[in-house]
Image (tube, helix red, strand yellow):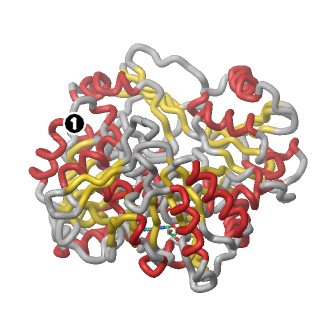
Amino acid sequence: MSRAPALLVLGDGSLEAARRVRGGIEGAAIHGLAGRTTGADHTFAEFGETIRTLFRDDVPIVAFCAAGIVIRALAPLLQDKRAEPPVVACAEDGSAVVPLLGGLRGVNDLARRIGEALGTAPAITTTGEVRFGATLEHPPAGYVIRNPGAGKRFMSDVLAGERIRLSGEAPWLTSTRLPFDPAGRLAITVTVRDMAPGERELVFHPRSVVVAVGADGSDLTNRIIESLAKANIARQSVAALVALERDVGRPEIHAAAAALSRPLRLLPDGPVSELARAAVPDAIEQTGDEAVAIAVAASPLDVDAIGRARGWLTVVGLGPGSRDTRTPEASRALAEADDIVGYQTYVDMAGPFPPEQAIHASDNREELDRARHAFSLAANGRRVAVVSSGDPGVFAMAAAVMEALDGADETAWHGVELCVLPGVSAAQAAAARSGAPLGHDFCVISLSDNLKPWETIERRLDLAASADLVLALYNPISRARPTQLGRAIEIVRKHRSPTTPVVLGRDVGRPDETVRQLPLGEFTPEMVDMRTVILVGSSTTRAVPRADGSSWVYTPRWYRKR
Ligand code: SAH
């Protein structure tokens, strides 16, 4: 399935057109130039770098600006026409739609869909497409070309006047202006059969086959391949693998779906023997056994209509605040999710989200409940992103999600595709702002005694400080425990000189960021709140004057006992 396009907008003047396109293309998101656009889904700082990164990441691009700007920005990357995503330039008011690149990846289709949304005819320039209304190398969804390498030669033969013999059924071909003729010297064959194309033949495989996997799954991928071979069915014709919901936890099924690069669909529990028939009630052909059954439909299948998808749950680290420090994979997961689950503040930080995405923001600190809720959504086939600030594995949702899974009775939860995406943690962000205080061994401690006894915290602080580790202290203080930070500072002072550099990073990466540096001897609890991370140097941590009168703090990589 092709990915949703990024709509690049350079100013508010194009927002209305971009919104119309977004409304017509599922999953499309508007990326606006920072400072020039308001209300985009994402912002970017620099056009050239952004469009090149999207291009390298294989994301379809729709840029609302002059075609020349797009061409110049992408020129250094244009090497391999098979590897390029679709790229379309649109006039900023939506009055022109020009497919530029990605001819083999459906750019004309994309341009047509944009054209429909904008009420503008796209400027299609591909010769075959113009003369015959078809791009053979890019068949519509539901068909796969078996020998794309032969497409160019084939098309130039057609342009030179050769005629085409068609066997098999494909409405999208017969509705074109291609010169079909039973006596033609060229051939197009549409078939689920596993056949090698002839010299002047293009073979298209309709995605009309379902492979149902049942009870015993040992060596499943090979058994599927053998069953397909026995039935003389091309692998390319497989539309989906189907399995029973109760089997979703079996890894060999996912390995087989990955090996075939086809989606897995889940059907409600029932007899395995009925699985293929349940997936394709009007099958024209059915073979196989209890382990692997094959059903062939008369035409390409709408995979989304078969049972349901396997849900996924991705725990996303948002980084400390600004989007610039969020990883591209985290942004992608947020864009692809059906549901966003998290603490209100972090959901706000992750957004804004388009209305199709369901937001489950809560104001309480019941992380485990939130994790369970996320699992129950994902176990029903939803794509769920659970958001955390910073890194989700550092005093955050990833551990709560694992805890919810640990020992959960619900088999469906174990079948959810689970993934954790890292983020820049507060200590790292504050460290970078102040130099390199974490340049040598360091240790991360939360001062919150919500989930652990205060004595444990005191003991760990004492041991870590006596081991001369740099300390990164999270959750330093709250209204419920106003005195503990004072006690923590006392413990550290037993082991460190009063000149030890301390860094206080508050709201790092957010609009109200402050990062200050001071000697341990001057540090008092009133200087911090819950939105602060504290870094306390080791005996080797040093301050270096900065040009602006403040100083850099760093901990050397070497270690010499003083
Ligand atoms: N998962 C988060 C930490 C969550 S615990 C991370 O990896 O950063 C919450 C604590 O993290 C806060 O009390 C504060 O100590 C620290 N923190 C989180 N974001 C911060 C930020 N932007 N600036 C400073 N401290 C932050």
Count of numbered circles on the image: 1
Vertical order, 323 against 260 (above or below): below
- Tag 1: amino acid: Leu
Location of residue 36 by image quarter: bottom left
Residue 142 percent location from the top left of the image:
52, 44
Q: Is residue 25 visible?
A: no
Residue 289 percent location from the top left of the image:
85, 31
Q: Mark 1 falls on what kind of element?
A: helix
Vertical order, 86 against 232 (above or below): below
Vertical order, 137 against 542 (above or below): above
Location of residue 29 by image quarter: bottom left
Residue at (37% x, 28% y) in the render: 164
Residue 392 percent location from the top left of the image:
56, 58
Residue at (33% x, 34% y) in the render: 83
Q: Is residue 228 visible?
A: yes
Q: Is residue 137 left or right of residue 237?
A: left
Residue at (59% x, 64% y) in the render: 446
Q: In this figure, which residue is indicated by the disc labeled 1?
A: 77
Question: Is 259 or 521 nearer to us in this picture?
Answer: 521
Tell whether circle 1 marks a residue whose Cβ is less than 8 angstroms from ligand 1: no
Alpha-carbon neighbours of circle 1 within 10 Å: few (<14), some, or many (≥20)?
Answer: few
Residue 247 percent location from the top left of the image:
81, 46
